[in-house]
Amino acid sequence: KTIIIAVAIALLLAVIMGYVFAQTLTGPILALTRGAKNMAEGNFEQSLKVRSSDEIGQLTSSFNYMASELTKNMSEIYQEKNRLEILLHNMSDGVISFNKDGEFMLANTAATEMLEVDKIDMDFSTFIRNYDINSGVYLDVGTEPSKRVTFPVGKQFISATFTPYYSAAGQIEGLVVVLQDITEQKKLDDMRKEFVANVSHELRTPLTTVKSYTETLMDGAMDDKEIAMEFLGIIDSEADRMAFLVRDLLQLSRFDNKQVLLDITDIEMNEFLSLTVKQNKIHAEGKHQQLTFEPYKEDVVIHGDRDRVGQVVNNIVTNAMKYSLEQATIKIYITEDDIYYKITVKDTGMGIAREDLPRIFERFYRVDKARSRAMGGTGLGLAIAKEIMESHGGKLTAESEYGKGTTMTMWFPKKPPEPPCKEA
Ligand code: ADP
């Protein structure tokens, strides 16, 4: 009996000791296994309890150190990714990337806006097809440098630069497409080309005339004094036309280069306009037109450069007379609102068609080219007038009904403008 009890106690003690021993040895190993599994699932922020200073304890400490380093590294990577994403999505250039199989990888907000879609979810070949990008662009560009193409999207013009990117081993990994909105640039470019073409055309006509009349004179027409005088008169007026054109072009160029210095003084417009009417009355009467100015009920003092304001007013009044037939009436009057004094020139002339109206302030734009030329116009008068009004902090507007008449209004700010232009 004693032996049985002793054996039972010994067995019990053995089981208890075995359990305690197993706990101290396998507990931390199980905890480590669980920790490693958690980590594999992406949970890096964990710390295991170090229960002993033996090898398992050291292993647990190392595990904890590894977890904290991984947490730190992952948060750095996350921050970096975040920074790149913010950068990408706030860029004004559009960015799209495709992998080497042509599958869509990513695109930023600017790219979706430029391509006028809600989401870019198309592969490379669909992208090329949808935007009708010509064949010069393909996926496997090898070691070729980037390629640039321009294509329209609605009313915009987009320039796309296709650049391949490579793996560390030098294998092509995909393509990055950088998009830029070049609509403004293209518009300016077109305008510049049109301007050069216009100037050349405007100069060529009088030059041809001068040349042909000079040749005729040299070929013998000089001997007939009457014909010679007539031809010289034509040459003189063509030379004048070229001089006017160059003068107007120079003036516009000075406005463009902000080289215009305004000599601002106070100008009382009732007096100023009465004088303008007096000076132009004789021309109006020559065409049996009625030119009138109705002075405002009180003094109207604007702040402006007397010569330039005169240039604008004269241009508009002479236009009203030029583009009106006989018997027309041209009325000048002043009104005001809180911000502006408005000087209006209203004629009962030929008017301007609705589609031409927004363009009359453009350089060289003329509704009726032949008539404008015949009247000695360069097609630059209103473009200069607009620049002058804007340099005074004001504006120039036009309303018109074809066949009925035109109303041009000069808006002068009541408050003196900041000095807008400085001598270069
Ligand atoms: P231009 O030297 O040809 O007169 P402007 O710049 O002064 O050039 O005017 C541009 C065009 O606007 C003119 O060619 C003319 O067709 C039109 N225009 C200007 N003022 C009037 C008006 N009062 N009535 C009708 N057409 C006008």
Image (cartoon, rainbow, N blue to C red):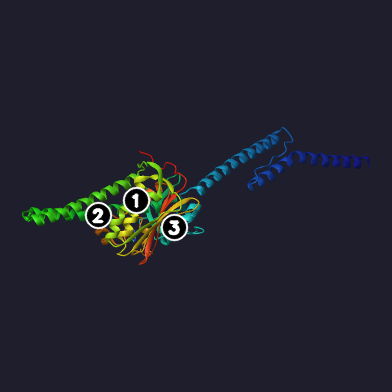
Find residue 112 and report its horizontal and vertical position in percent.
Answer: 49, 56
Callout 1: helix, strand or loop?
helix
Residue position for label 2: 202
Q: Type of residue at label 3?
A: Phe
Q: Residue at x 73, y 34 (%)?
A: 52
Q: Is residue 224 above or below residue 39?
A: below
Depth check, mark 1 against mark 2: the one in front is 1
Q: CA distance from mark 1 to mark 2?
A: 33 Å
Which quadrant would residue 133 be assigned to in this image?
A: bottom left
Q: Which residue is mark 1?
A: 275
Work out whether residue 163 or residue 308 is closer to the camera in this orientation and state it.
308
Q: Quadrant of the C terminus?
A: top left
Label 1 near ligand 1 (CB < 8 Å):
no
Instruction: Answer with the quarter of the image where residue 31 lies.
Output: top right
**Which residue position is annotated with label 3?**
124
Please state, as top left, top right, bottom left or bottom right, where the N terminus lies in the image.
Answer: top right
Q: Is residue 359 left or right of residue 210?
A: right
Is residue 309 among what the camera can see?
yes
Q: What amino acid is labelled 2 in the image?
A: Glu
